[in-house]
Amino acid sequence: MPPLFRHFLFLLLLLGSLPACKNTVQAPTFLTMEHVKFGGLTTAGAIVKADAVFNNPNGVGVDLTKTDLDILVNGKHAAHVDQSYQIKVPAKSDFRVPLEIKLSPSQVMGDGWSFLKGNKIKVRYKGHVTVRALRMDFKVPVDTEQEMDMSMFNQ
């Protein structure tokens, strides 16, 4: 077989395998928020702590490196979460990401009082988390809404 033909065949095989490489790592899937807890009051507002639950569908582990989420309560912007991490996530497993959400005083005074009286609120999480797999960063979109009441706290 002539060398030029071998190089052409190798290049053809290489280019043919590239589309398969694109689908080898899938973005983790956002599932829900759990373990929502009141973290305290400060002059800047209230602190709420929670775990965001994701599923890693990949056959390889990933590293969670960042969260960048807007929190909307009853359709109004309440907080922005921008945190960095170094969390190792095993292959084909669910994993939790600890979040600390700082709510503004106006949000606490508005929907916060209604919530404390036992009314339900709708909380929407919108943004992304960044994971690293096979030395590549992936921004995983998060856009989910959850109805909450006082029973969710301290679970």
Image (cartoon, rainbow, N blue to C red):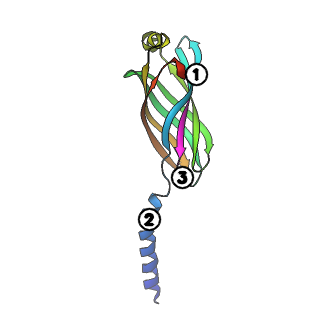
Which label's residue is closer to the chain start, 1 or 2?
Answer: 2
The residue singled out by tag 3 in the image is 58
- Mark 1 or 2: the one toward you: 1
Disc 2 residue type (three-letter) = Leu
Residue 52 located within the stretch drawn in magenta = yes
Which label's residue is closer to the chain start, 2 or 3?
Answer: 2
Using the numbered discs, state the Cα–Cα distance from disc 1 to disc 3 in whole angstroms.
30 Å
The extreme left residue here reads 75
Which residue is at a point 63% across and 44% down the rendered structure image?
A: 88
| Residue 148 percent coordinates (x, y) | 47, 22
Disc 2 and disc 3 in contact, CB within 8 angstroms: no
| Residue 137 percent coordinates (x, y) | 51, 47
Label 1 Cα neighbours within 10 Å, binned few <14 / some 14-19 / many ≥20: some
Label 2 Cα neighbours within 10 Å, binned few <14 / some 14-19 / many ≥20: few
The residue singled out by tag 2 in the image is 18
Using the numbered discs, state the Cα–Cα distance from disc 1 to disc 2 in whole angstroms.
46 Å
Q: Up-down: is 76 above or below 92?
A: above
Residue 119, disc: none
Which label's residue is closer to the chain start, 1 or 3?
Answer: 1
Element marked by disc 3: loop
Element marked by disc 2: helix
Q: Quadrant of residue 110?
A: top left
Task: Give the camera-side residue of 88 and 14.
Answer: 88
Disc 3 residue type (three-letter) = Asn
| Residue 32 percent coordinates (x, y) | 50, 34
Q: Up-down: is 63 above or below 112?
A: below
The segment highlighted magenta reads: 50-56
Residue 37, disc: 1
| Residue 127 percent coordinates (x, y) | 43, 34
Which residue is at a point 54% across and 52% down the rendered structure image?
A: 58
Q: Up-down: is 95 above or below 46?
A: below
Q: Magenta stretch mostly in which secondary structure? A: strand
